[in-house]
Image: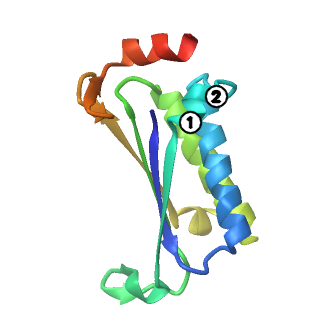
Amino acid sequence: MPLIDITLPEQALSPEKAQQLVEFTTDALLTLEGMEKNPKARMLTWVYLHTHPQTDYYIGGKHSAKPHYKFDVTIFANTLNDERKALLTKQITEQVLTLEGTDHNLLNAARVWVLFHEVADGNWGGAGQIYRINDLMKMMQS
C-alpha cells in the first residue's frame, strides 16, 4: 500500500513527462518491494502529483531559478532496507534529470529529494479498518 507524493513546480515537466515520472516511480518502488507483477499491489499504490508555481519555491529565503522535486514515499516500516532506499533514491533522481534533459551531476541531483516515511504495523488505516502488513501480504497472494 505505498503512497507516493511528488511535489514539483508546474511546467517543470510536460504532462507526458510527468506521467512518465509517476509510472516510473510506481514501477521502481513496486519492483524493490518485490511486487512489480502483482496487480493487487499496483491497485493499492497511490501517487499524488502536487504542482505549484515556480515562484512559490525558495532556497535560503530566495526564489529558486531551477525546479526542485520532492518525493515523499510512505511505506510500511521495514518494507525497504537501507540499500533499497538508496537505490530508489538514485533511480528517481536519475529519472528526473533524464526527463528534464539536464546533466546528471551533483548540482542537478541535489534538486531532487526523496523522503521515506515508514508507518508502523497497525498504524495504516483505510476502507474503514486498520491494515497489518501480514494481512496485506496474504491478500496479495490470493
Residue occupying image coordinates x 66% and y 29%: 36
Q: Residues within 10 Å of mark 2 (few under 14, many from 20)?
A: few
> Could you say which is closer to the camera, residue 137 or residue 66?
137
Residue occupying image coordinates x 43% and y 18%: 136
Query: Tag 2: residue type?
Result: Pro
Residue occupying image coordinates x 61% and y 77%: 12
Where's residue 93, x and y in %?
61, 55
| Residue 87 left/right relative to 44 | right
The alpha-carbon separation of the residues under discs 2 and 1 comes to 6 Å
User: Mark 2 and 1 residues: CB-CB less than 8 Å, in contact?
Assistant: yes
Whether residue 3 is visible to the viewer of this picture, yes or no, is yes
Quadrant in which residue 32 is drawn: top right
Q: Which residue is mark 1?
A: 43
Q: Work out whether 142 lies above or below 120.
A: above
Q: Residues within 10 Å of mark 1 (few under 14, many from 20)?
A: few
Where's residue 120, x and y in %?
26, 27
Where's residue 78, x and y in %?
38, 23
Indicate the quadrant containing the C terminus: top left, top right, bottom left or bottom right. top right
Q: Work out whether 140 lies above or below 13.
A: above
Q: Which residue is mark 2?
A: 39
> Could you say which is closer to the camera, residue 116 or residue 10?
10
Query: Tag 1: residue type?
Result: Met
| Residue 16 left/right relative to 39 | right
Q: Work out whether 13 lies above or below 4.
A: below
> Could you say which is closer to the camera, residue 89 or residue 132?
132
Residue occupying image coordinates x 48% and y 15%: 139
Where's residue 74, x and y in %?
39, 41
